[in-house]
Amino acid sequence: MFPTCRTRTLIALSVLILLCATTGYTADFTTPEGVLRALVRANENKDMATIAKFMAHDDDIVSYTIEGRKYVGWADFSRDMETEFKDAMRIEIPITELKVWTRGETAWFSMELDYIRYLGSGKEEVRMLLPLRETGIMERRNGQWMLVTFHESFRSEVSITPGTSSSNQAFPSLK
């Protein structure tokens, strides 16, 4: 006996609901906030393809991050992110505050997040909490919101447990 059209529809809807429930996250790429949240999620998942998709690659873009690092263009930033993804065993980035403003094809934001990176494993695991604040500018290009520039800084002291320091080149002087 073949399933009825209604049964097939219910099965398809059930599968769709199950897929959405198991991933726990559906990105909205039509808004600046949705793209920012997707970028944070991509960072947690070490997903350079998504990061590359939603960040501008202009050669003259200037961004700043912790430890006084300056990125000009995409290449320097991409190289540091690849190193970070290789060195960190896992990354968690809960967003504690996010505000986004838009006018036309431009958006700007302020965000506070906890960048939590884990190095090593088992008894050797080191957890680093980097309490960050980030501001930035986005532009809608060809209908898609893109992160154009950002500036990161610490909100407070850095916490590393258990008491060892990182040898990670992306954060060389954090103790």
Image (cartoon, rainbow, N blue to C red):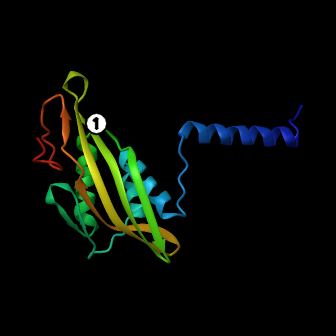
Among the 4 quarters of the image, the one containing residue 51: bottom left
Vertically, is 173 above or below 79? above
Residue at 55% over, 49% down: 26
List the residue tagged with mark 1.
89
Residue at 28% over, 66% down: 74
Q: Is residue 65 left or right of residue 20?
A: left
Q: What amino acid type is highlighted by mark number 1? A: Met
For the N terminus, the image quarter is top right
Q: Position of residue 115 (x, y in %)?
A: 30, 45
Secondary structure at numbered mark 1: loop
Among the 4 quarters of the image, the one containing residue 165: top left
Q: Is residue 137 left or right of residue 17?
A: left
Q: How many marks?
A: 1
Q: Position of residue 46 (x, y in %)?
A: 35, 47
Q: Position of residue 157 (x, y in %)?
A: 18, 44
Q: Is residue 92 left or right of residue 32?
A: left
Few, some or many C-alpha atoms within 10 Å of disc 1 (few <14, some 14-19, many ≥20)?
A: some
Vertically, is 59 above or below 27? below
Residue at 39% over, 64% down: 109
Vertically, is 133 above or below 19? below
Among the 4 quarters of the image, the one containing residue 64: bottom left
Report the front residue among 102 and 138.
Answer: 102
Q: Is residue 145 visible?
A: yes
Report the front residue among 47 and 163.
Answer: 163
Q: Residue most toward the top?
A: 123
Residue at 88% over, 39% down: 4
For the C terminus, the image quarter is top left
Vertically, is 66 above or below 10? below
